[in-house]
Amino acid sequence: MRLLHTSDWHLGRSFHGVGMLDAQRNFVDQLVSLVQSKSVDVVLIAGDVYDRALPGLDVVKLLDDALVRITQAGAGVVLTSGNHDSAIRLGFASRLLERGGVHLRTKVEDIDVPVLFPLGGDENAKNSTLNGQVVVYGIPYLEPRLVAERLGAENANHFDVTLAAVERIRRDVEARRASGPVYPVVLAHTFASGGITSESERDLSIGGLGAVPLDLFDDFAYTALGHLHGRQELAPHVRYSGSPLAYSFSEAKHHKGAWLVDLDAGGVIAVEEVLWEAPKALATLRGTLDDLLGAEEHAWAENAYCQITLTDTQRPAQAMERVRTRFPDTLVLSFDPQGAAARTSTSYSNRLAEAEDDLGVCCGFLDHVRDRDASDAEEAALREALEAVRLQEAEL
């Protein structure tokens, strides 16, 4: 049996004000093509399907289209809810969707209710007792304060509620093994110990206390994790697929993709990385304005989404407009003046006290708010304005 492990689609998300729906449609196209070309049996989506609890109509339509195309390509779907999803809304019509091969696991009550797939495909369904079954369990995002009592967890924290969920699954697995071989696969939307985070993820716990240990998943053939946006292997049988697209500049060096997981009677026999093609690259550039605009080494970033930090001692005039002459898709521009310590060591109140006249006050204010001295033209304009005020006051 071949599984495709994905997660964190975040349909409907924007990237620094740029809509990403077209890029997400492109990802769906790639996913459906891979399902067909690689003969994928089941697509796993480990939470955060949507970016918000109330997605827009076009976003809902995109998920609807994706699920229809995946099932038409011959694969089943098992989907859990994440911390960005509304579990109730995402789980709507789950019993009806199951008839079409889309299996939703968004309820605490369904944690130990697996989706059953005969090992070897539908042709072996009649011999599933002999050949074994892949049993897929979905653990949706568990908010400890809301689910601890329902799960019988000792304490309302991420470790205890996840432990309670996993113990329910283990009991069900053991009961099924009395009738034949089973190969448990678990989807979980959580922060597992050892995972590397990105800026685009929402913290699951204040103070970083939401991590759960990997050994909770030791008894399963494969654990498909969601929440962290970087594709990573925590153990051979415990992995994050990461998000299909970069959702922050901290992910500029990520290679976005998924995992193809092959299982047989011996368990997981192969895990292969899958890479998604991004419609636009991300670039994080740093340097003086003249260097960035002139250096040939930055040519590759001219068609990328850019985050640029200018290090000029004084903040350049019309910085964004000038940057965008070469890098038109600059989305974030910040300033980190180098060699400017002496300029910033004097407080603004001291600058006012040191000003010799009103013109010095005005020029000092400009310097304070933008880290750049007044130009000759600006100083002349300020001098003219101050003179006009003096003349007007003299006439009163």
Image (cartoon, rainbow, N blue to C red):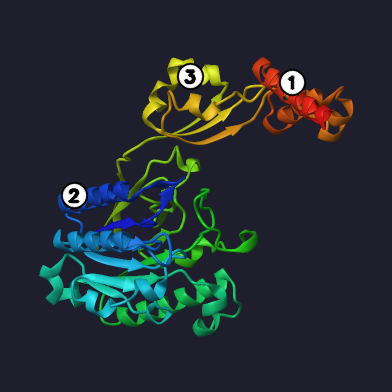
Marks 2 and 1, how far apart at CA? 67 Å
Q: Amino acid at mark 1?
A: Arg
The residue drawn where x is 70% and y is 17% is 380
Name the quadrant of the C terminus.
Answer: top right
**Disc 2 versus disc 1: nearer the observer:** 1
Q: Amino acid at mark 3?
A: Leu
Element assignment for label 3: helix
Q: Which residue is mark 2?
A: 33
- The image shows residue 145 at horizontal and vertical percentages of 57, 76
Q: Earlier in the sequence, mark 2 or mark 1?
A: 2
Q: Amino acid at mark 2?
A: Ser
Please rate how many residues cluster around mark 2, counting C-alpha atoms within 10 Å: few if below 14, some from 14 to 19, many from 20: some
Above/below status of 318 relative to 33: above
Q: Which residue is mark 1?
A: 383
Please rate how many residues cluster around mark 3, counting C-alpha atoms within 10 Å: few if below 14, some from 14 to 19, many from 20: some
Q: Quadrant of residue 12?
A: bottom left
The residue drawn where x is 58% and y is 34% is 334
Q: Which residue is mark 3?
A: 293
